[in-house]
Amino acid sequence: MKRYISLLFTGVLLFASCQHDVIYEVDYNITLDEENTYYAGEPVKFNITGDVDNLLFYSGETGAQYVYKDRYEVPVEDVLSANLHLDIRGRYGYIADYEALEIWVSKEFTGINGSNDPDGDRAKIKEIVDAGMPGWTKLDFKDVNKDQWFGYDFPMTDYLSNLCIAFHWRPKDPGLTQRTYWINGKISLEMAGTEPSEMRLTDLGFKSLMMNEEVDAYKKNAGNGSIRFDNATNAGEICYQGCSGNVLTYAIDGWVFTTPRPLNKVANDRGIVVKNLQNYIHEYVYTWDKPGTYEVVFVGRNENHLSSSEQIHKYTITILEKPAVE
């Protein structure tokens, strides 16, 4: 069989104007060239006739679907999976009968100021800690006294509307080596109508807070006893830089918060500009790389300062796997 196409056509004429007089209406047609073969990797030619000033093309592929042109978030029920993966390396330092690193998540936390309100930020976090971390869930992280990376996975489907991750660094005894940690991470998302995507921890944004009164609340990237974000290549996206015993007179108590944000936000699907007032074309060629059935949409529009008219043409096209050459 030379070619195969499943073709449905819908023509919709939309008219909107604040005036009663239409200046000019869009009137165009799209036909498929008879030389098309409709195989993946081969060009498909559309013939364009009629009067249209501006023409947009939606291929029907992921990220270019007309039905999602006004979608800026995916409904929770359309999120197929959301996973937080963390790689953690305890470099050196003492592990006692308490956890020198805690990891928490919340869908209620609104964040800290993180720049010019040290007293307010410290008071806010102290109140939460003293109350037992209400609104937060502690992730099951097991500290291991080995200088190697360990990976951990945590489902985040309960945090789609808003997610904040908090890393609490608290190696309580200044007389002992205060533990160093390197942390990398990412969030993997699968949502209907989108390609699988990933966000690094750095994409979420960080704000750090030292609870120790002896130091600047926002001390960072300052060597021993500080939270570092400046050595991701050699250490980690978050580096908790510990120190030997008795180097500091206080036990380190530091936090890193990601910026609270929803996970189901997406960019709206966009069409390709095929024609505008600056160019004249009578055909458009597009190639689909993958076999499948696609809803192709052309949106034609004429407009001026008095009125506008719009016409939409929809096609359902099936693209087949290209036959192997014998």
Image (cartoon, rainbow, N blue to C red):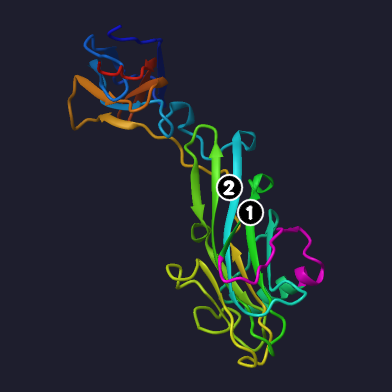
Q: Residue furthest right?
A: 131
Q: Is residue 147 left or right of residue 10?
A: right
Residue 47, placed above or below residue 191? above
- Up-down: is 158 above or below 222? above
Q: Is residue 74 left or right of residue 107?
A: left
Q: Which residue is mark 1?
A: 163
The quadrant where residue 109 appears: bottom right
Task: Name the element at disc 2.
Answer: loop
The residue that mark 2 highlights is 263
* Among the 4 quarters of the image, the one containing residue 304: top left
Residue type, mark 2 in image: Leu
Q: Does the image show residue 315?
A: no
Spatial separation of the CA atoms under disc 1 and disc 2: 7 Å
Residue 90 in the image: state x and y as whole percent: 60, 71
Q: Are marks 1 and 2 in contact (CB under 8 Å)?
A: yes
Q: Which is nearer the eye, 240 or 146?
A: 146
In this view, the residue in front, 95 or 58, is: 95
What is the chief secondary structure element of the magenta stretch? loop
> How many labels, in total?
2
Sequence order check: which comes first, mark 1 or mark 2? Answer: 1
Magenta-span inclusion, residue 122: no
As drawn, the residue found furthest toward the top would be: 1
Give the extent of the magenta segment: 127-148
Under circle 1, the secondary element is loop
**CA neighbours of label 2 inside 10 A, class few (<14), some (14 to 19), many (20+):** many
**x%, y% of residue 16?**
41, 23
Quarter of the picture containing the C terminus is top left
Q: Position of residue 296 (x, y in %)?
A: 38, 21
The amino acid sitting under disc 1 is: Leu
